[in-house]
Image (spheres, rainbow, N blue to C red):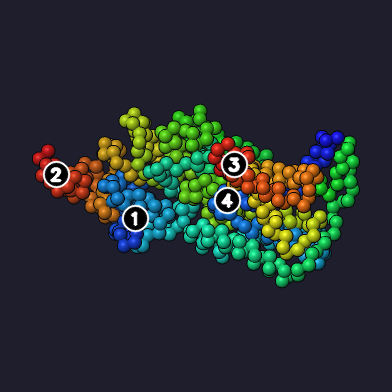
Amino acid sequence: MITSLLSQQIISGIAIGSIYALIALSFSLTVRALNVIHFAQGEFFMLGAFGAISCYMLLGLPFWLAIIITTLVVAALGIALQWVFYNKLWKSHHVFLLMSTQGTAIALANGAMLIWGPDAWRFPKIFSENVYKIGGLTIPEEMLWISFFAILIMIGFNIFLYQTKYGMGFRAAAQDRETAQLMGVNLAVADSFVFGSSAGLGAIGGLLIAPILFITPYIGPIFTIKGFTAAILGGLGSIQGAIFGGFLLGIIENIVTFWISSTYKDAIVFLILILVLLIKPSGLLQKKTIEKV
Amino acid sequence: MDIVLTIEDVSKNFGGISAVKNLSIEVEKNKILSIIGPNGAGKTTVFNLLTGFYKPDKGRFRYGELDITGFPPHKVADIGIARTFQNIKIFPWMTALDNVLVARQLRERTGLFRSMFRTAGLIKKESSSADKAMEILKHFHIADKFDFQAKNLSYGDQRKLEMARALATEPKILLLDEPTAGMNSNESEECVRVIYNIKDKLGITIILIEHDMNIVMHVSDKVVVLDHGEKIAEGNPGDVQKDKAVIKAYLGEEFIAYAENQ
């Protein structure tokens, strides 16, 4: 009985965990490559969800096209912000840069309110609402699709980073910017790749979860914190760690909701964040130092 | 005389201090040119200017007929100028093999689509790329450590790896910044052999910064002496060794008479 309840929570945790993993990945990318913590990740996520609303609900485009357009637009926004703010602030004190990302987050949330209004949007169900019962477990098909697409994106991203020449060049730039240039890596391109893919991955998270969430311009900050917590759990700056941390956080949340209380779900998650920062700040997966991308 | 690289009247100041001043050097093809001078003479600054990390305040760099002044580092690498650093700069978290493969990607560009979906032709090409990288590691006697993380290699092996990686970009000109620093005499000798091989077998032009005068006098076709960013002497090793300005810069005025009596 206990084990089947536990497996039920783990399975439910995987879907939301895959979304946290995407946001955690966004965090880790900019940290690993440029040592920048970009606090507008939750807002890129929120814009992803609104992109789904605009393209699919308002413009009537097919969902796959909504995914492509929204991801590209948010990635372009991430790159534009990089060129306008971060490239200039990068050489100044890191606190300035951190504050500018926080300012960006607030501006994006308010911008979204101007465009889409302050009220919650309900996105139509686009995935099947079937529910599978296997053994004692209940698995909504919707959750499967969300996890499936999120995992697919992360696998694709990993293949790009670790199996292609471009990915190799970008990883080299994360380890030694100066020398990577001598291997022909164009740093302007590498940096834009980091900011663009970081924003784009968050947007994909928002797109995928749109059908199961009430969407307002103010959902960003909570997902920023959740993604950040996930990234810390796995070791901030580690690609595999971010994905691991995302799933772990999703599962922990579900277990806490079920056995303790949904009211204290977030409080307990943040307690875990504080404990990990105090006891093992390099993350649960890391031995001592964080492996570079 | 076949000139591959021309440094034309180049100056660079840092906050009012002149690091390189009105420097002109012609580099001959397939020769070894050494740049020597006391500490702080501006030798490494010349390398940083050449590879695009600094922009000169004045003057031009010409690569053959091509004006490469102001080229960013990745373009300088692309036209065929590679370098090593005085303090080793490898990619510490990558394996030795991956360090060399990063350099190979400069010469082996494939389309994004093909590299994501790994067509049969590409897999063949990739394995040949890995073969080439292994071959380069073999030349430097570090092929058996190909899967070591670079940071775990010994100091000497890291130096070799850095040179192997520079060669993997298939340069026409190789800039070596104190390649024998921290090496014992056996290792230095091996390093000198390697430098000769690079010049003779691969036909690469070499610009060398080196402190060890035995090596400089032994390997150089031409020596340029810098002091406070200015060229104070230039010529073949024998002539430079007897040059009064050089002796003064290195040892002080009082040694000129001593050297003349020798």
Foreground mark, 4 or 2, reads 4
Q: Quick one: B119 or A12, which is closer to the camera?
A: A12
> Residue B222 at x, y = what percent?
28, 45
Give the quadrant of residue B240: top left
Q: Which mark is residue B7?
A: 1
Chain bearing mark 2: B
Q: Secondary structure at mark 1?
A: strand
The residue under label 4 is which amino acid type? Answer: Val
Residue behind mark 2: B255
Q: Quick one: B98 or B193, which is closer to the camera?
A: B98
Q: Secondary structure at mark 3?
A: helix
Inspect this view and state whether residue B252 appears: yes
Chain bearing mark 4: A
The residue under label 2 is which amino acid type? Answer: Phe
**Mark 1 surroundings: few (<14), some (14-19) or many (≥20) residues within 10 A:** some
> Residue A127 at x, y = what percent?
84, 52
Tell me the CA gap for discs 1 and 4: 39 Å
Residue under disc 3 on the same chain as residue under disc 4: yes
Inspect this view and state whether residue B239 appears: no
The residue under label 3 is which amino acid type? Answer: Ile
Q: Is residue B183 above or below residue B117?
A: above
Q: Is residue B125 rendered to the left or right of residue B212?
A: right
Name the residue at 50% across, 30% down: B145
Q: Secondary structure at mark 4?
A: helix
